[in-house]
Image (cartoon, rainbow, N blue to C red):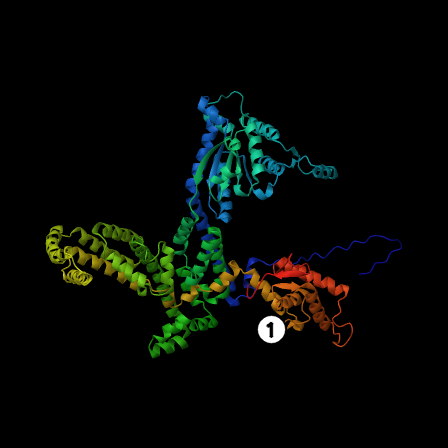
Amino acid sequence: MSTSSVSKGCFVFKPSAKKKKQLSLEDHFTDGCEGAENSEVRFKLCQLLWEQIKTDTEVLQDELNRKVLDSLLDLTRKCSSTRQHSDWASKMRASEIPTAALVLGVNVPDHDMTFQSLSEQLQQSVTPHVASVQAKECGTLKHLMKRVLEKLTGTDVAVDDEEEEEEAEQTSAPLHKSAHCSLSTLCDWYNTKTKKSSGGTPGKKRSSPAKDEQQQPPVVIIFKDLEAFNPRVLQNFILICSLYIERLPLMFIFGIATSPSTIQHMLPHSVSSLLCIELFQSLSCTQHLATVIDKLILTHQFPFKLNGKVMQVLISIFLYHDFSVRNFIKGVQLALLEHFHSQPLSVLCCKKKEALLNVTQLSLRDLERIRQLPSFKRYVERQEHEEQVRLLKDDGYLKDVCQRLIKDLRNYHKNYYPVLRCLHTLASSLPRYPLGKQIRELHLICLERNVWENEDYQSAMKLLKMLAKEELITLLQRCAEILQQVKSKEMKNALIQLEELLAKFKQLDTAAAVESVPDVEESFTSPVKNLQKKTDLFQLQKTLLEMNESRRSKKLSPFEVLRNEAIDFIDGLVKSHLSPPESQTLNEVCYYSSSATVRRHLNATPRTSIQAALNSPYYYIQNDNLKTEDGSVSNAAPDICIAYKLHLECGRLINLFDWLEAYATVVSAAEGNEPDSEDFGKVDQVKHARFIQAVSELEFLGFIKSTKQKTDHVARLTWGGC
């Protein structure tokens, strides 16, 4: 655009009113989505299912933390009421700062949710004056005081510093009125607030001491990560607060990730004696995870399921990395998103009525995808020839069959989880836990293969056939309670049979069992008497074999017969309903199986990615000049790639001068210089500077380091695939 004017001036060109269109979440989902024709439906299903999982997770976490949070709220109310009493013990207690040491465990990513819930409940029911601080915001006492005052008063706080004064001079019109950074300012602010809240109608009198507690609510300061605070800063802050405890009803809450002894290590006795500390222990992260898995994954309520390998990856990341339930749920969210994004048939992964309706709306392309599923191919192979032709040719008949298969898959899930809980109830009472201590371990075994073919399962069945009467009846009653909550026909029939077995146990004629005992004892008398005599090893072995044969040949008691019948009944339930999901037709609709994708996103290996980029820069830059066939790096590659490839040819110590000459030779070839020319391989200032930059980048990435053994050498730090 050109402008002309007699005099010089400034011309303003307003941009066009067209704004760049921002992509929505649905646009990001449909971009590169498999089966774009039904991507909108899948996005809505994915979003709806995730919202349901998120809501249930938040409710579950509130229930798990309710006990410890209620205890903290009671302590806060009690500390507020203690200041109103005039006895000697209350005065001594009021001279100390009430402190709650909340041990949350090493699952630090989950702490924010707990503290957020605690702050909301404190502000709703106890006091509006709550401040949460983190160590990264409070490196010095000045910044700690500043953050506390800002969180409580909601205004900017001025700090006595030269930089702050310069900024104040430059800013002529501040947005908020600044307050002085001291606790005396906080006391004045608190008195003003309490007077405003108590200044009602002057004619009314106080009716009860409870109103005094409401008029003087405590000031709660939450230290989210106590271990990360500077001990000196924390000590000075506590000393200053102790001087104002008579004017300001302070209370501290320490968030501890490791052990309560952290307070003793960080605070000397002269400081810790100013605190009245009470310890609170939250639920362990492993118990939290077990509850989340039990309520969200081991249920037929949610149609989306995880494969055994994906489940193993998420649990391994939890156990060996962060112990974070929040990150575990994020991993479930990632698997959910990937499943609906990459599987076009995930449109059937929804509630039963919606899934049956979506089957009728499947396109011809979707029907062909169903025919290509491995589980459906196995199903077709089991059918007769005429049935196979109809399934492969008749689209309408295929939809009817798919509806029936979807119902069978739902019934499979309804029966799978109750039987899984019954088996876990029985196996978890056995010594050494042959099928795992947690139900998730048994679930992983069932996902991989037929559990009844496992040696541990067979040993568990043998141990169950040795249980005492009272213990076995108790376990069977717990199994009956589990089956009572299920509405499927198979589980109702199983419950009827189990109740009949329990009735038989109660009706056992104990007299007949007592009469059979002497006969058994008589059968053992002769071998035992032989054992009392002096005998050799051969005679001992012979006697033990006779005892074993006598046990086998003896007649079983009525209880033993009924016990074997009960265990065989449980074994039949397991073989009928605990087959792996891969054996079910159309399991690919609901089960996500790409464990490599989950591991790549959640458990990234940056060293491998960096080495891949340095070895083959074409993979990332997509420049045809960098493409090589033999795996070598092109001489036109970036300087750091050339330097990295050359350093792989060296030993433990690398001579910088030799490295520089080799680098200059490769770069000269890239510049097109002839090998016979005098300038070929010559090091000029530009090449020298580029080489220094490449070496510095390799040192920053951790491939080399400087060494004191030789001044003109660097040490190599990585070898092979490391």
Q: Is residue 566 left or right of residue 366?
A: left
Quick check: can you spot residue 307? no
Please state the total of marks drawn on the protein image: 1
* Residue 325 at x, y percent in the picture: 46, 51
In this orientation, which residue lies closer to the viewer: 635 or 16? 635
Q: Quadrant of residue 547?
A: bottom left
Residue lying at 74% horizontally and 39% vertically, measured from the top left: 170
Q: 641 or 387: which is nearer to us? A: 641
Quick one: quadrant of the N terminus? bottom right
Residue 65 drawn above or below residue 406 = above
Task: Give the camera-side residue of 534 and 660.
Answer: 534
Query: In the rendered image, which quarter contains the C terminus?
Result: bottom right
Q: Quadrant of residue 308?
A: bottom left
Q: The residue tagged with tag 1: helix, strand or loop?
A: loop
Image coords of residue 20 (percent x, y):
66, 58
Q: Is residue 450 left or right of residue 73?
A: left
The one nearer the camera, 713 or 279, is 713
Q: Residue at (68%, 71%) from the top-left corner?
A: 635
Q: Is residue 631 above or below residue 590?
A: below
Residue 518 spot, x, y in % from top left:
10, 53
Side of 528 relative to 259 (left or right):
left
Is 574 left or right of 547, judged from the image as shown?
A: right
Residue 645: name its quadrant: bottom right
Q: Amino acid at mark 1?
A: Gly
Residue carrying label 1? 631
